[in-house]
Amino acid sequence: TTEETWQTVDSYLTDTLGLSDPALEAGLKAADAAGLPRIAVSAEAGKLLNLLVQITGARRVLEIGTLGGYSTTWLARGLPGDGKVITLEYSEKHAGVARANLDAAGVGDKVEIRVGAALDTLPQLELEQLEPFDLVFIDADKENNPNYLRWALRLSRPGTVIVVDNVVRNGAVADAASDRPDVLGTRAALEYIAEEPRLDGTALQTVGSKGYDGFALARVVS
Ligand code: SAM
């Protein structure tokens, strides 16, 4: 099959399953209008995140990489009334677009956006001695994926679920000779999942409107 088929099927699934709505569409439009890159998760992946929040009964969610708040909206919608997403974003501009989108989608009060390099804001979270996170979604600069996984573990408890996005990259991840920082970071993250006894995980390849990619899913064991 071709990318065109993946697109067609993605649209079919989104329509048939009713995976989008005006608030989500408006958020994507606003991100486009502000010139943000079109690298948010697909509606299907967003719904998967939403379901994971519900299935795990997560109350505290950490997201690394906010962009315009699309995945954040899906995560926040899965939370119970007292639930909260803390989402980390490097770009002041992206954070501004996300704040407006999240407020417009009616989930603004459930989301705290922390602006800065995640490797600076993650240690701050630890210093604050917050409750551990129940679910962590890692979707920022891919070269830092192993660092983000290590931080996710520090801020977790046994049973915490960790999702790492974009672990296939059109197949580039299987190229052991690659010197691309994103590939090196993702390979190191997958090796970390395999080697770290506190993590139990897998990865799945996906195709769709976002091309050929995939995600890793891990559970904190201890
Ligand atoms: N999760 C979003 C969604 O699906 O709607 C997409 C996130 S986008 C793939 C990656 C985001 O990570 C960008 O907004 C980028 O500015 C941000 N980012 C890049 N480097 C970062 C860093 N060091 N710390 C925090 N955020 C970073």
Image (tube, helix red, strand yellow):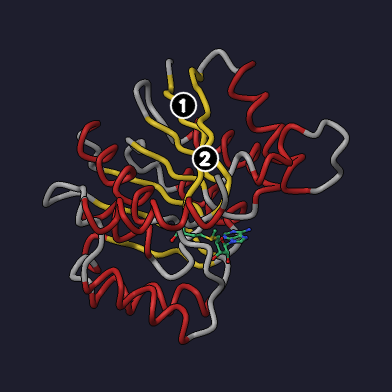
- In this view, the residue in front, 56 or 209, is 209
Report the number of numbered marks. 2
Farthest top residue in view: 197
Instruction: Please state the horizontal and vertical placement of residue 15, each as a whole percent of the image.
Output: 25, 59
* Left or right of 110, for residue 210: right
The amino acid type of the residue labelled 1 equals Ala
Give the position of the C terminus as an image quadrant.
Answer: top left
The residue shown at (20%, 39%) is 54
- In this view, the residue in front, 26 or 73, is 26
- Give the image quadrant in which the ligand numbered 1 is located: bottom right
The residue shown at (64%, 16%) is 195
Label at residue 81: none
Residue position for label 2: 164
The residue shown at (29%, 37%) is 52
Instruction: Please state the horizontal and vertical placement of residue 172, each as a whole percent of the image.
Output: 73, 41
Instruction: Please state the horizontal and vertical placement of residue 27, each as a whole percent of the image.
Output: 34, 74
The residue shown at (77%, 39%) is 184
The amino acid type of the residue labelled 2 equals Val
Q: Residues within 10 Å of mark 2 (few under 14, many from 20)?
A: many
Label at residue 218: 1
Q: Residues within 10 Å of mark 1 (few under 14, many from 20)?
A: many
Label 2, secondary structure: give it: strand
Q: Does 53 appear above or below 108? A: above
Give the position of the N terminus as an image quadrant.
Answer: top right
- In this view, the residue in front, 52 or 79, is 52
Tags 2 and 1 in contact by the CB under 8 Å rule? yes
* Left or right of 96, for residue 194: right
